Image (cartoon, grey):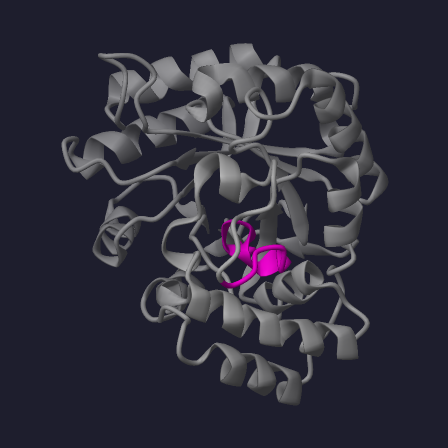
Amino acid sequence: MQYRQLGTSSLQVSEISLGSWRTFGTAVDAGTAAQCVRTAFDCGINFFDTANMYGKGAAEHLLGSLLGAYRRDDYVLATKLYYPMSDTDRGLSRAQVFKQIDASLRRLGVDHVDLYQCHRYDVETPLEETMEALTDIVRSGKARYVGFSEWPASEIKRARAIDGAVAFVSSQPRYSMLYRKNERRIFPLCRELGIGQIVWSPLAQGILTGKYKPHEAPPPGSRGERKGLGRFFKPDVLKAVGKLQEIAADLSLTLPQLALAWVLRGDLVSSAIIGASRPDQIVMNCGASGVELEAKVLQRIDAALDRVMRR
């Protein structure tokens, strides 16, 4: 496993990180989750990402109980707030920032998180109020750094311009070979501001695993069967993804490893978040760390996906 600095922070995070969306506390039982966390550490993963709304706190509670077996200095822990936790608890108001960080810390069983992220932008709360609250959270020691997920470029700029406010060190955007929209505005702006990228859905919700085939139903028990795969579950997309199998095979990689190595090319992305329902998935995906893709390989990927990628 290789490690990268997260933006302008002092955090060194593993290139592959383990997330808990739609897995821990919901689809994955406690025993399997424990095996996944143990395997993650064995593979060199030191970065674990969750959110208060995943399973309405269940993911934080389970992840926290499992990480309790490890030294706190041995891992980087991130969580988020914004989405509803009750009929009255949602958003990024000062009251919610204070309430939700305390609730997350209780569920996680720690006295601080390394990264506290705004899950989305809150149009109903003045940005100045949110940034003041986040600044106080960092000053109190409850979070070392702060970040955001899927914020508009205009609000990222405004947040940085607020005098005395804590600076964001991370962005958590959707990003994959199939979904590249954030390359246009968000990535250049974040590079300018020293904000690192922690990308989610690098396998395009499983489409880039290669297990879904054109004109075929999702395999039994797969995420596609349980949850659906939306815009990417289309014959033309699946046919294009099929072309990537040959590229991966030529490099002695699995398709997921190729997709993760593509996300990690260069120095733009600090870490790619994977989900896992089995330990062997973690072992396989960690094989992408340190893989370098030559220019001609990147050209072959672009040619295969030219008509189906979202830019």
Residue 234 on the magenta segment? no
Residue 217 drawn at (x, y percent): 52, 50
Q: Position of residue 76 (x, y in %)?
A: 65, 35
Residue 75 can be seen in this image: yes
Range of residues picked out in magenta: 202-214
Q: 241 above or below 149?
A: below
Residue at horizontal 70 percent and vertical 25 percent from the top: 33
Query: On the image, which quarter does residue 227 sit in?
Result: top left
Q: Nearer the viewer, residue 286 or 144?
A: 286
Classify residue 84 as left or right of residue 264: left
In the rendered image, residue 26, in percent from the top left (x then y), is placed at: 55, 22
Question: Does 148 sit left or right of 29 as displayed?
Answer: left
State which quarter of the image contains the C terminus: bottom left
Q: Residue 100 in the image: x percent, y percent?
A: 39, 17
Give the vertical position of 43 relative to 238 (above or below).
above
Magenta region includes residue 207: yes
